[in-house]
Image (cartoon, rainbow, N blue to C red):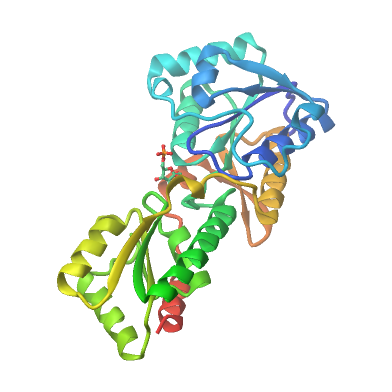
Amino acid sequence: MMMSIKKIAVLTSGGDAPGMNAAIRGVVRTAVFNDIEVVGVFQGYDGLIKGDFKRLNVRSVAKILGRGGTILKSARSEEFRTKEGRAEAYRQLKEHDVDALITIGGNGTFTGAKIFNEEHGFPVMGIPGTIDNDLYGSDNTIGFDTATNTVVEAIDKIRDTANSHNRLFFVEVMGRDSGFIALRAGLATGAIAVMLPEEEMSIDELIAILDKGKASNKTSSIVIVAEGDANGGAYEVAKKVTEKYEQYEVRVTVLGHIQRGGVPSAWDRVLASRMGVSAVEGLLQGKSNVMVGVQNDREVFVSLAEAIDSKAEMNKEEIRMSRILSI
Ligand code: F6P
């Protein structure tokens, strides 16, 4: 069933991710291509509630394909968590004659979009934009590839110092409750161990791995600790290891927000562009309360409920292989 849509609103919400701008561009250009007007909403759901809207045309999204961050700005809105906030957002959309809303973000963004759709019956479409890669229904989320590359670049540099000084480095990476960035970066940098929320590793197990490395003449090592790891982050892991294990000179690096910014990779630009197109086309086909995903290189739509509630499965084979390769 084709939907009659004349005006779409688009916003970015939650943590920014490299490639969000490419997704905005994809949405705007596909909408204009289909004679649909677009308004950009500033500062996520907060801007929706305040009516902070601005008309976007094809030129408003020129030269943003390769820019990090989000031209629409982002926020984690407290007000949109309230029924009153969402009612005001609905009123603003109606007042501006908007027919559908595209939200680019992660878990929290889609939780808000889903409740909003259920309360007001307003058509919503999600585009997965988060470095964490923790949404079910898409093999990759926008920003994950770039963030992983940023981590790899940083760890390559740390590796030089680790080698020069025969040191053991603990590097903490983002991912909230997921270890996708940690695992991929571990494989790409040859980390001796990767500590993931998905596969708990005790300090004793870690020490056994470090001992084995030392026995095979390893002089320096990198351990990647996902921020959501049960042992309590890189500083905590380093403390527990040094209490039991004094042979190594230990250093800790928490990479922090450098992982969120920067120029999006070619992969993320393409993924975001494809998702931007599909999001608008999906709305025109009458789809709502869904997220666009790419699975096995094909566009799919999954319900927002599934995207949020089902667990994005980590590839267990990659975990197994990273253990083989790091001996
Ligand atoms: O969801 C993206 C993310 O960068 C997580 O990896 C991290 O836990 C969180 O956001 C940090 O949020 P903030 O920028 O609000 O401190």
Residue 189 seen in the figure: yes
Residue closest to the far front: 165
Residue closest to the far bottom: 216
Residue closest to the far top: 95
Q: Quadrant of residue 7?
A: top right
Q: Position of residue 14 (x, y in %)?
A: 48, 35
The answer to whether residue 246 is left or right of residue 98 is left
Pick the front one: 248 or 171 = 248
| Depicted 42 relative to depicted 237: above or below | above
Figure quarter occupied by ligand 1:
top left
The answer to whether residue 110 is left or right of residue 204 is right
Q: Quadrant of the C terminus?
A: bottom left
Pick the front one: 92 or 237 = 237
The answer to whether residue 213 is left or right of residue 73 is left
Q: Position of residue 119 (x, y in %)?
A: 46, 22
Q: Quadrant of residue 191?
A: bottom left
| Depicted 253 relative to depicted 60: above or below | below
Q: Position of residue 224 (x, y in %)?
A: 39, 65
Q: Position of residue 269 (x, y in %)?
A: 69, 49
Residue 138 seen in the figure: no
The answer to whether residue 101 is left or right of residue 225 is right
Residue sitting at x 36%, y 89%:
217
